């Protein structure tokens, strides 16, 4: 069966998920053509040449990607850049910034040749073309993201591949770009492809998608055969903070099949922030929000309010660290928290109790409590927010 917007009951009273489908997907813009990418790079170089012809030192204007003052929140998209962002200059006549200016031109040259020749490379590949020049991998990563932001062109369209760390399992089959047929099963995990956009002929009977924060929890649910015992579903994990390909895959599945998507995270500030990255995006990648965010994601658990509701043993809870308190205070100021009063209540519970819990805390009841009790009850009775 091909992908289609549908929700069907598998057992009486189970998975009444219709309320999760109120938000229609925001479709990403079509990727730019090769000629458009080449032209964008040529425009930058022409500006450099024009400055030199006027006896002026060339410079590059880069948007301050990590500045919250440049970010606006829209509930249908998430965190995205404002139209009047503050910028910083990378000058060619300043001893401090001249090396960085040269690296930007070098990277633009590499990208131009790859697009022109229709070849692709990972960020790691690019770093090893000249390790002495780049110095370390982080330099390459930052420059690539800055160029992508400056040109307003997604990284994939620059012919730069991202290494995937995420995994997927469940009721899904597809064909990869090279023609390889992939059938995700409930007993094994499949690596997220390095070219998610190249996936085609997606087919599923899944009733919902479950994003799992941690690899260990993901594997536990696989061992319990969760994605077929309850009802057909798809499970995805980014193994912590998700890489770009995992986020693109979640977005692709939402745009394609439009079934409910739930997030299963640790009940701590860092788990909540990871969920927010899937749902509303990150500040540093806000210029690609339309390609990466899925605002329809629902927080299924673990909720701080579950501690008292389930009588989770005190011994299974973990006291806050200073880092937790700082992260929670930061989260409480995020623009999307005020948009979700129920989220605010959960954060307030943590702020008062100063306690957190990992999903594994549920094993204090039984080893299979998560797959046989917690998740089925949450899905049956609408225990998401």
Image (cartoon, grey):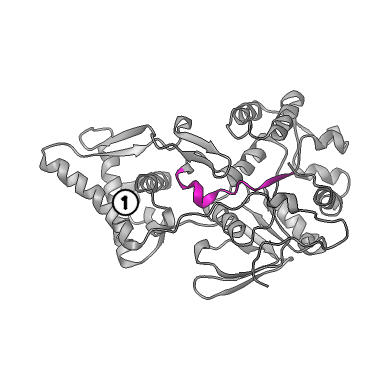
332 horizontally vs 31: left or right: right
Q: Position of residue 282 (x, y in %)?
A: 53, 41
Of residues 19 and 230, the one drawn nearer to the viewer in this rendering: 19
Residue 317 in view here: yes
Residue sitting at x 80%, y 44%: 383
Assess whether residue 203 is covered by the magenta stretch. no
Q: Which quadrant, please, contains the N terminus? A: bottom right
Extreme residue toward the top, this view: 352
Q: Residues within 10 Å of mark 1 (few under 14, many from 20)?
A: some
Task: Give the number of marks.
Answer: 1
Of 214 and 30, which appears nearest the observer?
30
Q: Position of residue 375 (x, y in %)?
A: 81, 51
- Magenta residues span 287-300
Give left or right: position of 263 versus 16. left
User: Left or right: 373 with respect to 259?
Assistant: right
232 relative to 238, above or below: below
Give residue 35's quadrant in the image: bottom left
Inspect this view and state whether residue 312 appears: no
Q: Secondary structure at mark 1?
A: helix
Vertical position of residue 200 compared to residue 296: above or below: below
8 or 103, which lies in front?
A: 8
Task: Name the residue: 79% across, 59% down.
Answer: 226
Q: Position of residue 276 (x, y in %)?
A: 61, 41
Name the residue located 83 percent from the left edge and 51 percent from the top edge. Answer: 380
Q: Where is residue 7 shown, x and y percent of the image?
A: 74, 60
Nearer to me, 9 or 265: 9
- The quarter of the rendered structure image containing the C terminus is top right
For mark 1, what is the residue? 107
Residue 293 in magenta stretch = yes
């Amino acid at each position: 069966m091909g992908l289609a917007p549908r929700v069907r009951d598998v057992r009486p009273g189970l998975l009444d998920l219709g309320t999760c489908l109120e938000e229609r997907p925001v479709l990403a813009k079509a990727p730019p053509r090769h000629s458009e990418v080449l032209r964008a790079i040529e425009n930058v170089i022409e500006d450099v040449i024009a400055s030199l012809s006027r006896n002026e030192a060339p410079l590059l204007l880069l948007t301050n990607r990590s500045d919250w003052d440049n970010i606006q929140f829209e509930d249908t998209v998430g965190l995205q850049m404002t139209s009047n962002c503050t910028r910083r200059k990378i000058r060619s006549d300043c001893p401090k910034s001249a090396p960085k200016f040269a690296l930007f031109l070098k990277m633009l040259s590499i990208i131009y040749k790859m697009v022109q020749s229709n070849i692709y490379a990972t960020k790691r590949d690019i770093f090893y073309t000249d390790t002495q020049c780049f110095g370390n991998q982080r330099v390459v990563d930052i420059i690539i993201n800055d160029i992508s932001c400056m040109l307003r062109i997604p990284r994939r369209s620059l012919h730069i591949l991202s290494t995937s760390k995420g995994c997927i399992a469940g009721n899904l089959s597809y064909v990869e770009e090279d023609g390889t047929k992939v059938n995700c099963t409930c007993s094994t995990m499949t690596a997220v492809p390095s070219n998610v956009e190249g996936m085609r002929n997606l087919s599923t009977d899944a009733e919902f998608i479950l994003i799992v924060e941690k690899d260990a929890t993901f594997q536990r649910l696989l061992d319990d055969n969760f994605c077929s015992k309850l009802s057909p579903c798809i499970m995805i994990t980014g193994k912590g903070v998700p890489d770009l390909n995992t986020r693109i895959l979640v977005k692709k599945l939402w745009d394609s099949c439009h079934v409910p998507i739930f997030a299963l995270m640790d009940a701590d500030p860092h788990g909540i922030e990871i969920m927010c990255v899937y749902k509303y995006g990150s500040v540093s990648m806000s210029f690609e929000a339309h390609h990466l965010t899925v605002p329809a994601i629902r927080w299924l658990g673990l909720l701080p309010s579950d501690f008292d509701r389930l009588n989770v043993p005190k011994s299974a809870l973990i006291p806050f660290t200073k880092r937790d308190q700082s992260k929670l205070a930061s989260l409480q100021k995020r623009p999307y928290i005020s948009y979700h009063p129920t989220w605010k209540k959960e954060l307030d519970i943590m702020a008062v109790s100063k306690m957190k819990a990992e999903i594994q805390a549920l094993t204090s009841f039984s080893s299979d409590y998560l797959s046989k009790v917690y998740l089925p009850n949450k899905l049956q009775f609408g225990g998401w927010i």
